[in-house]
């Protein structure tokens, strides 16, 4: 396989690209997104959706042992979450990749260039899912009443950040990573709530439960902060606060709050050439699952898989877990 007369090896390209997705995405490296071997095996079976069974926590009081009265057996409760398959693809002309093709290792250079694109695209999908779960200022998301605090009249500060952690009660300590847009990030640095990345003071505050890397992460109470401007206010969050201020959202996550699984499509990567126009094309396809633990996709995609707009639709998600503390994410909304 050739691209601009350069030998193109799909297997090597995909290996480079997959490594980049894991190393460059703040959501992966912070531990927010995790992979599960059992779910990956189920995902590989096919179908537009995937069933993810789970057992509920055991409850009730223990009983006194007796040689007269036997123990009472209770049923193991459980339910099934439904995840949805993402089918995504992108094509690039060789002219878009001209600089990479001219390098010493064009395969790795192209994988880096396209891999960075997929990192951004996957994070955009994740953010769309979060919008669907927590809904707009007007409310309506599956987690709006149980896992969201603040609103258009509130302020993001030290007290309200703690309120967001407290939404999970005694499980709040599990929330080990934070995500926000850059405007919020720098505002909270000014309020001395975030220790900037690289600060010698912050070096001892990193929460090593989920990430050993911290060079570029700021930290909030030891929690690494992922900064992504895809989380900036949109929709009715723009100008929806007191005095027409924008309403910003801060998300807190436990490790593995989002599940990820990826399989190779039938033809994950290929090249083609239009001999009349002299244009060569690289086509890259992705097939993956990105799922919030404790919830189910209940929508019906218009196409083969949901669009970002469909992920953002609040009516396409439902809560499955009985105990809200087992859904390991919360959100805080407010003005700065």
Image (cartoon, grey):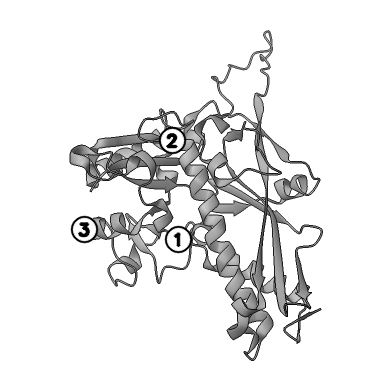
Say which mark, if any, is on residue 103. none
Mark 3 vs mark 1, CA separation in Å: 21 Å
Left or right of 155 on screen, residue 226: right
Tag 2–tag 1 contact (CB < 8 Å): no
Secondary structure of the residue carrying tag 1 is loop
| Mark 1 neighbour class, 10 Å CA radius: few under 14, some 14 to 19, many 20 or more | some
Helix, strand or loop under label 2: loop
Q: Is residue 304 above or below residue 74?
A: below
Q: Earlier in the sequence, mark 3 or mark 2?
A: 2
Quarter residue 301 falls in = top right
Q: Secondary structure at mark 3?
A: loop
- At a point 57% along the width and 39% down the height, the residue shown is 310
Whole-number angstrom distance, CA of label 3 to CA of label 2: 29 Å
Q: Residue at 38% across / 46% down in the picture?
A: 234
Tell me: 63 left or right of 171. Answer: right
User: Which of the two marks, 3 or 1, is nearer to us in this view?
Assistant: 3
Look at 26% across and 41% down and name the residue there.
160
- Closer to the N terminus: mark 2 or mark 1? 2
Nearer to me, 267 or 76: 267
Please name the residue that numbered disc 3 is placed on.
192
Q: Is residue 103 above or below residue 305?
A: below
Q: Is 54 rendered above or below residue 229?
A: above
Quarter assignment of residue 12: bottom right
Q: Which residue is mark 2?
A: 135
Quadrant showing the N terminus: bottom right
Question: Residue 204, relative to residue 64: is it above or below?
Answer: below
> In terms of depth relative to the viewer, which is nearer, 328 or 61?
328
Local crowd at mark 3 within 10 Å, few (<14), some, or many (≥20)?
few
Residue 18 percent across, percent down from the top left: 65, 67
> Is tag 3's residue or tag 1's residue first in the polypeptide sequence?
3
Q: Residue beneath label 1, please?
A: 208
Residue 110 location, x and y as percent?
64, 77
């Amino acid at each position: 396989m050739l691209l601009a007369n350069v030998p193109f090896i799909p297997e090597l390209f995909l290996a480079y690209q997959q490594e980049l997705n894991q190393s460059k995405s703040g959501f992966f490296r912070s531990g927010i997104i995790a992979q599960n071997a059992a779910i990956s095996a189920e995902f590989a079976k096919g179908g537009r959706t995937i069933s993810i069974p789970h057992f509920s926590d055991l409850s009730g009081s223990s009983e006194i042992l007796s040689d007269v009265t036997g123990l009472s057996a209770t049923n193991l409760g459980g339910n099934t979450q439904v995840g949805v398959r993402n089918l995504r693809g992108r094509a690039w002309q060789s002219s878009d990749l001209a600089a990479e093709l001219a390098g010493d290792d064009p395969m790795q250079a192209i994988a880096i260039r396209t891999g960075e694109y997929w990192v951004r695209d996957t994070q955009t999908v994740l953010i769309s899912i979060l919008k669907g779960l927590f809904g707009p200022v007007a409310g309506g998301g599956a987690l709006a009443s149980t896992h969201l605090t603040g609103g258009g009249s509130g302020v993001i500060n030290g007290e309200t950040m703690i309120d967001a952690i407290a939404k999970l009660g005694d499980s709040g300590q599990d929330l080990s990573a934070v995500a926000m847009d850059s405007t919020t990030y720098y505002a909270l640095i000014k309020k001395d709530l975030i220790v900037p990345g690289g600060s010698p003071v912050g070096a001892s505050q990193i929460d090593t439960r989920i990430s050993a890397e911290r060079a570029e992460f700021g930290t909030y109470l030891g929690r690494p902060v992922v900064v992504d401007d895809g989380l900036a206010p949109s929709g009715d969050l723009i100008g929806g606060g007191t005095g027409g201020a924008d309403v910003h959202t801060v998300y807190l996550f436990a490790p593995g709050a989002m599940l990820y699984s990826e399989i190779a499509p039938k033809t994950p990567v290929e090249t083609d050439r239009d001999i009349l126009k002299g244009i060569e094309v690289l086509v890259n396809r992705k097939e993956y699952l990105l799922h919030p633990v404790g919830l189910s996709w209940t929508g019906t995609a218009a196409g083969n898989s949901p669009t970002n707009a469909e992920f953002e639709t609040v009516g396409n998600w439902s809560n499955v877990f009985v105990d809200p503390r087992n859904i390991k994410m919360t959100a805080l909304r407010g003005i700065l």
